[in-house]
Amino acid sequence: MKPVYISFSCFIKEIFKDAMLAAMTLLPVILGLLFKFGVPLLNALIAAQTGKTDFLAPYYLLFDLTIIFSTPVMFGYAGLMIILEERDTGILKYLAVTPLGMKGYLRSRLVLLSAIASVYGFAVEALLHISAMNLVQIALGSAFSFLTGIWLVCLIVSLAANKVEGLAFSKFSGFLILGPFAAFFIKDALKYLAAFLPTFWFTEFCMSKGFYAVAALAVSFALSAVYLALSVRLFKKKA
């Protein structure tokens, strides 16, 4: 594992050499603080004007899930730019034939980064959540985001021919938030049009109880595992 940790330390140094990429790692905390103090304040202001005390309260879970789902995307974006640069310059192919190997490369560039993102997201949510999410749900959300961070970066790298295309494709990662919005705002069967999104099922888990909640949780992780397997395979072919 020593080559993996050496490679990972170099990877982190490259990320923090770029001020914009380094700033991406602070966004979850900034958003968490904004939601923690700004959203209840806004809800109170609306209540003072309209008398509706629960105008935003039903959607507190949506704000918390946004943090959980976006944290791996923010960290993944920082890592994505480095990975694309390494591929464009041929460094990726070089590292793949060293003792590090392709598996070690994936661990140092994706697995460890996503693991840090998921722990980071858990800490932010545990301290700053505004909904009734409990620690078990937050922990499951962090585990879910761990898988999401890996397959999303793999997919973008596989689709992008260069850093410019990678930047363009990364903007489409926002589609992940469509899952929670479908679960929250579409009340009939039409919401299942978003069933291909693991984030939809995890939101259904958080909003439900009983067997359906357990089934939704299982589907969210199963879909994530399928996307992970497919995206890693594409990554290896493209690399």
Image (tube, rainbow, N blue to C red):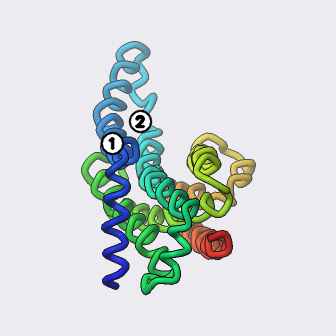
At x 50% / y 57%, what residue is drawn?
Answer: 80
Residue 114 is left or right of residue 90, and the answer is: left
Question: Which residue is situated farthest in the top direction here?
Answer: 49
Residue 211 is left or right of residue 15, and the answer is: right
Would you say residue 182 is visible in this rendering? no
Residue 40 is left or right of residue 190, and the answer is: left
Q: What is the spatial separation of the Cα atoms under label 2 and label 1, in whole angstroms? A: 16 Å
Splitting the image into 4 quarters, where does residue 29 fall? top left
At x 36% / y 57%, what residue is drawn?
Answer: 14
- The residue tagged 1 is 32
Q: In the image, which is nearer the foreground, mark 2 or mark 1? A: 1
Would you say residue 224 is visible in this rendering? yes
Badge 2 or badge 1: first in the primary sequence: 1
Circle 2: residue type = Ala
Circle 1: residue type = Gly
Neighbourhood count class around disc 2 (C-alpha, 10 Å): few under 14, some 14–19, many 20 upward = some
Q: Residue 129 location in percent, x, y?
A: 32, 47
Q: Secondary structure at mark 2?
A: helix
Between 209 and 20, the residue placed more toward the observer is 20
Q: Residue 176 location in percent, x, y?
A: 58, 51
Between 99 and 198, the residue placed more toward the observer is 99
Splitting the image into 4 quarters, where does residue 42 fall? top left
At x 40% / y 47%, what residue is drawn?
Answer: 21
Between 166 and 190, the residue placed more toward the observer is 166
Q: Residue 19 location in percent, x, y?
A: 34, 42
Give the position of the N terminus as an image quadrant: bottom left
- The residue tagged 2 is 57
